[in-house]
């Protein structure tokens, strides 16, 4: 049988890993600057964490979860997103008693059994944050500004930021009723999913992507027209905060998000470069989720960014996230005796923090030179019997042949000095 990846998964190969590492490093740095601490949660949870957290009516729970019974007969699910697991951890570890707000960030893989498309995978990666304990609009603006800082720091232009408010339990029932009435004479002509959504949660009908449902959905009432006074005040507070930070946004009443836990603020960063749905990042407020999952009454807000989609966006904007750092130095040997020396020297250099390569393939002198060239290693030291006997060698800059004598006994220090000085000259 021919070996192949499962559909919807991808290898991240050594020639791409530097992009990921740069994005991961910058995201962690920016989160730390905003006072967020990293949390690492398990890849799988008890299935009911997602059923209760993400919501039984969502496509994610109804159709996309990787759920299986483990050998102990428990129903287990590979996480389709991070929020439910972080909330479970927040409750289980009593984080509600920590000083508020509790600000957490994560870098995870997530799993959804979705139809493969550009920018849509079955295993994908998310950078996310969750902040617990603050109910004002300022924290909503803070996490949006964190994202803007991240985009700026990696050098990509901010993509379109769309915000909306989807109300709270006091104004939602009125909206719910408006939707029930609106769809009552249309649901028969809509897709099977919408028929089910009509019974469970008609608000889910608003994000239906089916062609036959679209005309009905486009004309449907919008939550923003039904907001209560508190939700209105919160939403205008968010807009004022974003404006005071010079963050450009647009209000898009069609954003509802695909997960059930949201209330009030929802937002997305969208772009034309990342596939049909175009969302690089989505998030929002979930003021009832902690309580619904059995914890204290603590409001929350967060977002998750699809790392694959973020990297697609960076590429389409022509942003090179970082140049790969090749190994700095190649130690080339000329005989069996000098090979032993070279092997020891490489160990010393690496312990001193200098990256280097030695031959591990029994290559001839010429073949070692060719190999170093192919890898683009910028500096080289050749060691033969004469160098071993005299204790002296030459370090050479490959680009232009510029070289300097060094004492082998003092190799790490002298090599580091030469490489630093010659970098300045370039
Ligand atoms: P989400 O909108 O389901 O929200 O996913 C967030 C991001 O993950 C999307 O904008 C997209 O970039 C990426 N993503 C989702 N599904 C896929 C896929 N199949 N393939 C590639 N990328 C994908 C959440 O997950 C929420 N937990 C966000 C959140 C955190 N809300 C509050 N806190």
Image (cartoon, grey):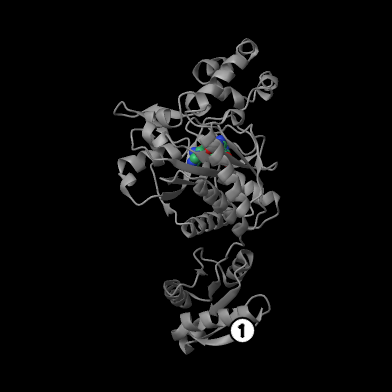
Q: Nearer the viewer, residue 374 or 63?
A: 63
Q: Residue furthest front?
A: 229
Residue highlighted by disc 1: 403
Q: Is residue 112 left or right of residue 40?
A: right
Let me know if residue 3 appears in the view: no
The quadrant in which residue 217 appears is top right
Disc 1: CA contacts within 10 A as few (<14), some (14-19) or many (>=20): some
Q: Secondary structure at mark 1?
A: strand
Residue 404 rendering spot, x and y as whole percentages:
58, 86
Which residue: 61% across, 54% down?
244
Quarter of the rendered image showing ligand 1: top right
Let me know if residue 299 appears in the view: yes
Which residue: 44% across, 85% down?
409
Q: Is residue 347 left or right of residue 313?
A: left
Q: Nearer the viewer, residue 215 or 89?
A: 215
Residue 110 rendering spot, x and y as whole percentages:
48, 39
Quarter of the image where the C terminus is located? bottom right
Q: Is residue 87 left or right of residue 16?
A: left
228, above or below 425, in the image? above
Which residue: 51% across, 67% down?
359
């Amino acid at each position: 049988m021919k070996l192949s990846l499962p559909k919807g998964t991808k290898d991240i190969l050594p020639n791409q890993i530097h992009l990921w590492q740069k994005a991961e490093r910058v995201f962690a740095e920016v989160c730390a600057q905003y006072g967020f601490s990293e949390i690492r949660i398990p890849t799988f949870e008890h299935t009911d964490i997602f059923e209760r957290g993400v919501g039984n009516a969502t496509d994610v729970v109804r159709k996309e979860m990787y759920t299986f019974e483990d050998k102990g007969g428990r129903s287990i699910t590979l996480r389709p997103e991070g929020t439910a697991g972080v909330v479970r951890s927040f409750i289980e570890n009593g984080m509600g008693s920590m000083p508020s707000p509790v600000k957490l960030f994560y870098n995870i893989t997530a799993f959804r059994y979705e139809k493969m498309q550009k920018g849509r995978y079955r295993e994908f990666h998310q950078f996310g944050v969750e902040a617990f304990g603050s109910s004002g609009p300022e924290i909503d603006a803070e996490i949006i500004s964190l994202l803007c800082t991240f985009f700026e720091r990696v050098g990509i232009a901010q993509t379109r930021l769309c915000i909306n408010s989807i109300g709270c339990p006091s104004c939602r029932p009125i909206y719910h009723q408006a939707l029930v009435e609106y769809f009552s004479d249309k649901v028969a002509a809509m897709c099977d999913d919408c028929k089910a959504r009509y019974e469970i949660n008609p608000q889910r009908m608003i994000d239906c992507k089916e062609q036959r449902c679209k005309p009905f959905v486009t004309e449907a009432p919008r939550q923003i027209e039904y907001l209560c006074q508190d939700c209105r005040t919160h939403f205008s507070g968010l807009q004022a905060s974003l404006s005071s930070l010079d963050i450009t946004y647009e209000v898009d009443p069609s954003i509802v998000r695909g997960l059930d836990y949201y209330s009030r603020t929802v937002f997305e960063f969208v772009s034309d470069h990342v596939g049909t749905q175009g969302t690089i990042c989505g998030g929002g407020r979930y003021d009832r989720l902690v309580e619904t999952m059995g914890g204290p009454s603590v409001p929350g807000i967060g977002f998750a960014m699809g790392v694959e989609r973020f990297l697609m966006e960076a590429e389409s904007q022509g942003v090179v996230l970082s140049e790969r750092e090749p190994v700095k130095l190649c130690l080339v040997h000329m005989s069996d005796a000098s090979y032993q020396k070279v092997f020891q020297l490489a160990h010393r250099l690496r312990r001193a923090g200098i990256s280097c390569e030695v031959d591990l393939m029994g290559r001839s002198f010429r073949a070692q030179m060719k190999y170093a060239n192919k890898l683009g290693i910028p500096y080289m030291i050749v060691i033969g019997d004469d160098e071993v006997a005299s204790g002296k060698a030459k370090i050479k800059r490959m680009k232009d042949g510029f070289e300097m004598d060094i004492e082998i006994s003092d190799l790490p220090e002298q090599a580091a000095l030469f490489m630093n000085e010659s970098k300045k000259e370039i």
